[in-house]
Image (cartoon, rainbow, N blue to C red):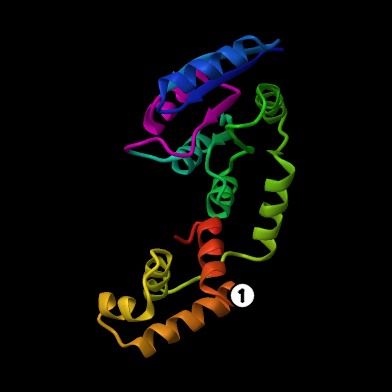
Amino acid sequence: MTTTVLLVDDHPVVRSGLRAVLDAADAVRVVGEAATGEEAVTLAGGLHPDVVLCDLRLGEGMDGIGTTTALRALDPAPAVVMLTTFDRDAEILGAIAAGAAGYLLKDVDPDVIVDAVRRAAAGDTVLAPDLAARVLQGVRRPLPRLTDRELDVLRLVATGASNKEIARSLFVTEATVKSHLAHVFTKLDVDSRSRAIHIARRTGLI
C-alpha cells in the first residue's frame, strides 16, 4: 500500500529535496506541496494525505505547531511529522502536544525521513532517541514558569548586560534585579548566569 505525503516548507529548495528523497522510496508518493500553514490545511482537506511532513517555522501566518493543530482537527486527520532545524524543548513539547506523530531534525539521513513517514502512517510515534528522552523529561518535569519581569531580566542577562545596566533599562533598582535573578536561578535550578542563559535558550524561554 502506498503512503501519500504532503510537504509543507516555505523554502522551495527544501521541498524539492524532500520530494526527490520520498519519490525515490518504494510505496511512498508525494501528492502535494505547501509553502504556508494555511495552504497546507486547505490542501490536506482535499488531498487527504496519510502523512504531512511539516517545518516548524513557516514565515508569515501559522507556524508548524498551529498547522499541526489544524491538520489534526481534519476528518480524516493526517499524521504529522515535524522536520525542522529547531530542537528547543518548548518547540518539541509544543509539537507533540499539538498532535504531531514525530519530530525530526533536518540533518538526519534521508532513510530516517522515509522510515519516519512510513511509521507515522502506521500510527507510530517517531522521535530520535535523544529527543524522546527530552520529551519524557519535559512531561515529568514541566518547563518552569517565569514572570514577565523575570523574563525581561533574563533576556537582558543574555545580552551580557550587568545588573546596573539591567536596572537602568527596566527603571528599577539593582536590588530588584538581584531579587528577580535569585528567583530565576531557583526556578531554573541553576547557580550561574551562564547556566541560566543556556537552560533558557535550550527550553525556549528566551
* Residue at left offset 40%, top offset 67%: 160
Residue 39 magenta-drawn? yes
Residue type highlighted by circle 1: Asp
Image coordinates of residue 60 in percent, x first then y, are: 32, 37
Whether residue 59 sits left or right of residue 120 in the image: it is left
Element at badge 1?
Answer: loop
Q: Quadrant of the C terminus?
A: bottom left
Tell me the residue that label 1 is attached to. 189
Residue 64 magenta-drawn? no
Image quarter of residue 81 = top right
Whether residue 132 sits left or right of residue 45 in the image: it is right
* Residue at left offset 29%, top offset 84%: 172
Residue range of the region highlighted in magenta in the rendering: 35-60
Image coordinates of residue 42 in percent, x first then y, are: 40, 26
Q: In the rendered view, tell whether residue 83 sits above or below residue 118.
A: below
Residues 65 and 171: in front is 171
